[in-house]
Structure formats: structure tokens, C-alpha cells
Image: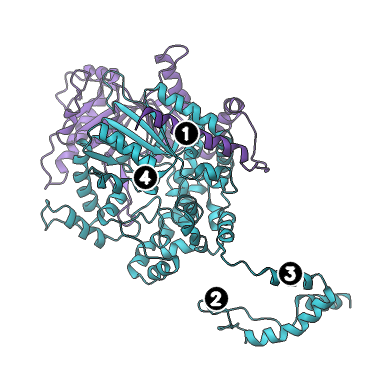
Chain colours: A cyan, B purple
Amino acid sequence: MQEPIENLKNRAHQALGDEKLKAALSVIPEGFVNKRLKAKAARPDFSALSDRAVEIKKHTLENITHYLERFEHAVSKAGGTVHFAQTPDQARQIIEQLCKERSAKRIVKGKSMISEEINLAPHLIKAGYECIETDLGEYLIQLRGEMPSHIVAPAVHLTRDDIRQDFQTAHDELPIERALETPEDFVKEARGILREKFLNADIGITGANFLIAENGKTVIVTNEGNGDLCQSLPQTHIVISSFEKLVPTMEDAMTMLRLLARSATGQPISTYTTFTGGPALKKGELGPTEFHVVLLDNGRSRMLGSDYSEMLRCIRCGACLNHCPVYQNLGGHAYGSVYPGPMGAVLSPQFFGRSMLELSHASSFCGRCNEVCPVQIPLTKLMRKWRAEGRQKPLPLITMKLWAWLAAKPALYNWAMRLALPIAAKIAGSKSGAKHLPGLAQWTHHRTAPSVSKQSFQSQWAKSEKAGET
Amino acid sequence: MSLKDSNSRRHDFYAALKSAERTMPQADDKLSLKLTPDQWQQQNKDQYNQRLTELTRAALGGEDVVSFFKAHLLAQKAVFLEPTSRAKILPTIASHLSSESDSSNANEAPHQPRLLSGDNPFIHQLKAASKDSDELLPVILNAATTPLEALKEGEPDCISTAEAGAAESGTLILVSGPENPTPLNFLARRHIVLIKKNKIFAAYEEALAEIDSQSRKQGSKTEPAIPRTINMISGPSRTADIEQTLTLGAHGPVELIIVIYE
């Protein structure tokens, strides 16, 4: 994988200068924002569903050990095994061990953000396995050695020209003069190449959108059907997931599903939603003979006990990315994390450490993310928390103390204001605002500072009160 | 990795969660319910499943459940066939399949039509009813003949039966088993799904209740036979990964063909 450029600011500058990226990202308003709006309108009870979804997630998290025990019990009863990993390293070890014990050669993978979180496919490839991402978008970025740039549409930053080149290099067994023009051409070619891989794979790895405590099922949603081929053809199915995906019952999962696709892609439901669990034991039933679930913590239990616990409600729909003015302009790679956008700004420091604190600055705090979140996560509140934690030099205490002292003395305060405002107004310049302010060049470099009134608010107020009396 | 390792990892995992549960900030807003898991399940049963069903019915806006189901699936580019009787189901499907393969892409390898199904009693019945027809009849895979190999020879067309349908999103619900092997749903080039009209419900909760009652019938009184896999299918396979342009037939079926029968 390519190492991202140091520093959010540099990556943002690079992204803003990339015309091709701009063209690729221009599909987001029509492709995601408007579609979500229409889907939401078709469901007048959307906000009631959202309230219920919050209840479901809260209830599950408040009783998390109970539901985890139930889930574990149900998986064992169906003949599967649950494995536990505190760290990404442990999770990778467990999965590698499972592959080794089965003398696996080829692994087919469904799309899973948690596998991106632990860099699973590159790790398995390094360990000598053939590990193929089968979601078309993931396949495209795997060919390029890139990170996903969106949690739902990982290759949203690519254009047909990019993909044509990659296909011609990667699929060199096909005639070079073949047509690669329409989206159908690309999809058909990938289908042919990947079908062969599915049919001859030893292990299938998928993620899970939900885990059902009452019956031990894992849930995946896809539009392509690739996840289902991963989990129904190879002899061993491994699910990589985490505890916050648990919901108590099938019905609870249905409530979440009503929100997920509408928020993500504006579909009423994804084309394929699959509940599966346990090996295929019935005579004549086709399916894997082994079923494993690997649960990763990686800081999630710490989040659960902290002020960031609300973030564990996230269902990875990507609505906060699609509606974020910063994401819309930068795309995902500028964030330097597999989790971009507002949700990524909150999650990444938890999973990848303090170097990710800078992501909390990739926000204008406009609050659209809060509004569109189907599970009502206060994203700006949590980002602000990270900003505070990340502040290296807090305002010197003496400044704040001086301010407090002054503000508590109205007469002195008013006098100081009368004195200070004309000076400030002079510095801030014309009515249209200041293009340069001493000491604030970083801020005024990109925007104009508002002009400063010569009269303080208090004196204006007093004047208008007087005018009202007469 | 030894058993001891995995036991201690399990122990650590639960210990971290238990300690987090103790320090978890207590939510104080209206959405915090403080129900025990048992109360939760009871509340779901007594109140919420019904309420969500009603909300869903309201969202359908009083339209007939079957026509809403069809409208959703048509919007997702599924195809409906309407045979006039049960005996006509297989012949109608056969003629649809062969009429299409004639006109299909000329530069592709000639597509030898093969129609596969699981060891499905209903399809056995239909096959018996269409005995005299010389049309394409499904090859029924059974425990003795089902090696996955049968699926590896090119892309077959497959036929399955749905256990239930949900109109709210135009969704077919299929359960796994020898009658409907899961891989057929995804390996098929064209997937044909048969669904009985009275199994189409408005809301997911009702469709789940139907699946649940079927698995109770199949299992013992105390132990319902929970199917290994439940597939919800709402259209042919698709992707928008190439420049956000909707394209059908990504990995799964290029065409989803539905027959509603009485």
C-alpha cells in the first residue's frame, strides 16, 4: 500500500489541485445526496425508525456482555466458533492460523471495513496467500494498491480511464484490443475473471453489518452478490467483525436495515441481504463445512466506557461522508485513514492513535453530518472533543484569567471596549472586511475577516432601548 | 495458537467489556429505556413488531400489497412472468429463457441453456405436470448428484422457491436447504424465483413470522430448525462502482425472473 503524504494540510492541498478527482467526486450530490432524500421521503416514518434504531443500539451496548454471550452460545450451538482478538495483530494471527491449518492457497474476500482497519488482505498476501478482493470497487483499488476512499463506494475517486489502464495491465491474458468503454464492458470483464476465483477458492472472508444475538447469524448486505459467493462456495467461511455490530433479534436487524440502504445509497434495501451462520450440515445442503467468527476490539471497549461511546452506534452507511462539504471537495484519501469523513475523524484516533487527531480539523462544523446520521450520533460534538484533546498549546491561563477579571467588571469592561473598538475597526479595515490581519494570516489567507463595528454591542443595545422608549 | 491462548483472549475480551459497562456514561435522554434483555424481547413481541408493521403499512399508502411488491421489483429491473396455470409455469419459463438466449450477445460463446434447481418438492410437482412438454425442464440437483462441479460448467440458469415476500421493499426471502441450495441464487446467470401469492406480506416482521412458523413446523417443539442461511433478494445483481453508473449482473444474476402463483 502507498504511504499517504504526511500531514492533513498537505494532502488537502494536493486533493484540491486534482482536477480529475474533482470530476470523479462531482457524482456525489446526485448519486448519494439526492437519492437518499428521495428514499427518505418515501418512508414517512423515517424519523420514528431512526429513534427506534437508537434505542436498539443503546440497549444492546448497555447490555453488551449479555448479548455477546448469547451470540457466542448460538454460534457454537450451530457448529461454528467465535474467536476473540484485542488487537489487529491478534486478529490477523488468528485468521492466518486458520488459513494455514487448512492448507489454503486462495482466499476470496467480501468488502469489509474492519478488514481494511487491520490491513488484512495485504497481510495475507505477504504471508504467501492469494487473497482477492471481490467487491468490484475493492478489486479496483486492490489492483492499484490504494486505500478505499469511501466506506460504501471505495473506488468513487476513479474514472473509467484509470480503470481501463489497470484492467489492461492486470488482465493481460485477454486480447489487448478488446472493448473497454462502457461500464458494462468493465463489469463483464471483472465478472469473468472473478467467477473463476470464486469457484476455486479455499476460504471466504466477509465482514458483517450486524450480528444477531438470538440466533448467532451474521448479516451482510451487498448489491453485487460477491459477499454471498465468498460465504457460500469455499469450504471455510471466516467472518471478521466487532461487538458493536450486535443487535438482540432478527426484528431489530430489520429496523436497522430499513435505515441502512436508504441512508447509504438511497435504495429501499440493498439487492442482497443475507443472514447466515454455522456450517452447512444438512444432507444435500451446499455451503461451507466450517464457520468462524473473529471479533476484534481494537479500542472499542475503551470507547464504550468513555465519552465517545455514542460513536459505537455507527452502522457505516456513509451518509456523513456524502453530506460533508469537506469530504465532497477532498475525497477520502486526503484523510489518510480508511475511515474518512466525519465518522472517520471520530473513529480514526481511537483505532490508529493520536496522529489521527488532525482529522478533527477536516470539518467546518456545519452539522449536516449530525442531521443525516440515521443513528443520531452527535458527530460534531465528538469531533470537537478530539480537537480539544489534540490542542497542543492551550490559550495561556493568564489570558483567560485576565479576560474573566475584566468581564466581571461592567464599568471597566465598557470603558475598555470604547477604547479598543475604534482601533480594532481601523485594523480590520473597510466595511467589506479585512483581507489581512496582523498575526492571523493563516485565517485570512483563505477568507475575509468580518469588519468590526466601532460601537460595542452593549452601547448599540442601550441606544436602541432608548429609541424604543421615545 | 494453543487452546490456552484462545481461552485467555476470550477472558480478556469479556473483562474489557465488563469494565467498560461499569464506566459507561449513563444516557439521560428520552431514548434510554433501561430494559433488561428479557423485557426488551417482550416489548418487541408485545408492542414493536406490531407498531413497525403498522408504520410500514402506512408507508405503503393503502396500496394493495402484491402490486406494491411488484412495483418495487420492477423498479429494481426484475422481470415478471405470468403463466395462466400451474401446469404452464415451467413451459412459460422455458420459452422466456430460450427466446432471450437467441437474441443475446452474438460474440459470446454459444450459451447451452441449463436450468438447475435444488431437490425441491414443488419443482418436482411442476416437472411432473409438464411431462408432455418438450421444452427445457429443470435438472434437479439432489444429494447424490449435487457436487458443486455441476455449477462449474459455465453459468447455468437456476430456479428456486421463495418462502416469503415483503412488499415494503420488493424483497423475496429464500431459506437455505437441499430444496434451495444458496449458491444457486448467486451463481445463476438468470435466476427464476417462484413465490405463492399469499406469502407476500407488507412488512419484514410479518415475513419473518412466516419463516419462523415454517422452521417451527420443521423442527421439534422446543427446537425450531433455524435455517442456516436466509437470503433477502430485491433485484438482479448490480454495481455502481464504475463512475456511479448502475450496471446489472455484477457477480450474481444478470436477470431476476419472478413468477407469482396462486
Q: CA distance from mark 4 to mark 2?
A: 39 Å
The quadrant in which residue B7 appears is top left
Amino acid type at mark 1: Asp
Say which of marks 1 and 4 sits in front: 4
The spot of residue B80 in percent (x, y) is: 32, 35
User: How far across and how far down the image is residue A221, in percent?
Assistant: 39, 40
Name the side, left or right, on which B47 lies relative to B229.
right
- Mark 1 packing: few (<14 Cα in 10 Å), some, or many (20+)? few
| Residue A324 shows in the view | no
According to the picture, the residue beneath numbered tag 2 turns out to be: A443
Q: CA distance from mark 1 to mark 4?
A: 43 Å
Disc 4: host chain: A
Q: In the rendered structure, are the residues bearing label 4 and label 2 in contact, judged by CB atoms less than 8 Å apart?
A: no
Classify B78 as above or below A77. below
What numbered label is drawn on residue A115? Answer: 4
In the image, what residue type sits under mark 3? Lys
Residue A456 drawn at (x, y percent): 75, 78
x, y percentage for residue A165?
20, 60
In the image, which disc is placed on residue B64? 1
